[in-house]
């Protein structure tokens, strides 16, 4: 399946499974464990696995990804406010979105191995690449 339409369909399908298990979907603790430099944006958070702060932020990440999946034909519109927030107010280093995308791929693959086929991997990689691109477009 080479077309974006086909990949979008696969992304939606896999998300429907992830959305049923939001605690498994976000790679937030994996991000902080694998890339400790990302912790600098959360000095007021308890960043231990299972903490309420991580759960709260993970819920926001899942909600944003859910919005992007629902608006897969207009991801830029769905994430415009988040893009502005992260660029102008929070000033998050844009590379962190790619790091989070990688952690999300690994997390989804490990929790949903039967669903995470080669086509699903390709579709999710493309989808998360678009999400990262949208979230960093205000930096330009």
Image (spheres, rainbow, N blue to C red):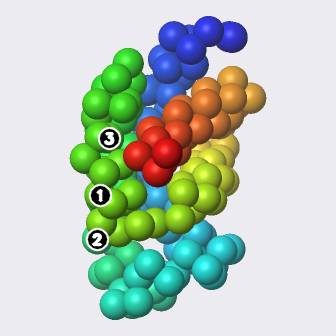
Question: How far is the residue under mark 1 from the one under mark 2?
Answer: 17 Å
For label 2, the residue is 56
Question: How far is the residue under mark 2 from the one under mark 3?
Answer: 19 Å
- Residue drawn at 61 percent across, 31 percent down: 126
**Which of the image's four quarters has the N terminus?**
top right
Badge 2: residue crowd in 10 Å (few <14, some 14–19, many ≥20) = few
For label 1, the residue is 85
Where residue 65 appears, x then y in whole percent? 38, 44
Q: Nearer the viewer, residue 119 or 75?
A: 75
- Name the N-terminal-most of marks 3 and 1: 3
- Name the N-terminal-most of marks 1 and 2: 2
Where residue 104 appears, x then y in whole percent? 57, 53
- Name the N-terminal-most of marks 2 and 3: 2
Q: Secondary structure at mark 2?
A: helix
42 up-or-down from 18: above or below: below
Badge 3: residue crowd in 10 Å (few <14, some 14–19, many ≥20) = some
- Residue drawn at 41 percent across, 67 percent down: 91
Where residue 115 appears, x then y in whole percent? 60, 34
Check whether the beta carbons of the residues at disc 2 and disc 3 lie within 8 A of each other. Answer: no
For label 3, the residue is 79
Q: Secondary structure at mark 1?
A: helix
- Residue drawn at 68 percent across, 74 percent down: 34
Where residue 87 appears, x then y in whole percent? 39, 57
């Amino acid at each position: 399946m080479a077309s974006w339409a086909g990949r979008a369909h696969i992304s939606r399908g896999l998300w429907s499974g992830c959305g049923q298990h939001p605690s498994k979907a976000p790679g937030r603790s994996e991000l902080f464990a694998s890339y400790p430099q990302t912790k600098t944006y959360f000095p007021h958070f308890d960043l231990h696995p299972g903490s309420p702060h991580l759960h709260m932020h993970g819920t926001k990440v899942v909600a944003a990804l859910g919005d992007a999946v629902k608006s897969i034909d207009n991801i830029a519109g769905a994430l415009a406010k988040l893009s502005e927030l992260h660029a102008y107010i929070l000033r998050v280093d844009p590379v962190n979105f790619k790091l989070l995308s990688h952690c999300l791929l690994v997390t989804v693959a490990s929790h949903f191995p039967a669903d995470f086929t080669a086509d699903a991997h390709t579709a999710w990689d493309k989808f998360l690449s678009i999400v990262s691109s949208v979230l960093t477009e205000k930096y330009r």
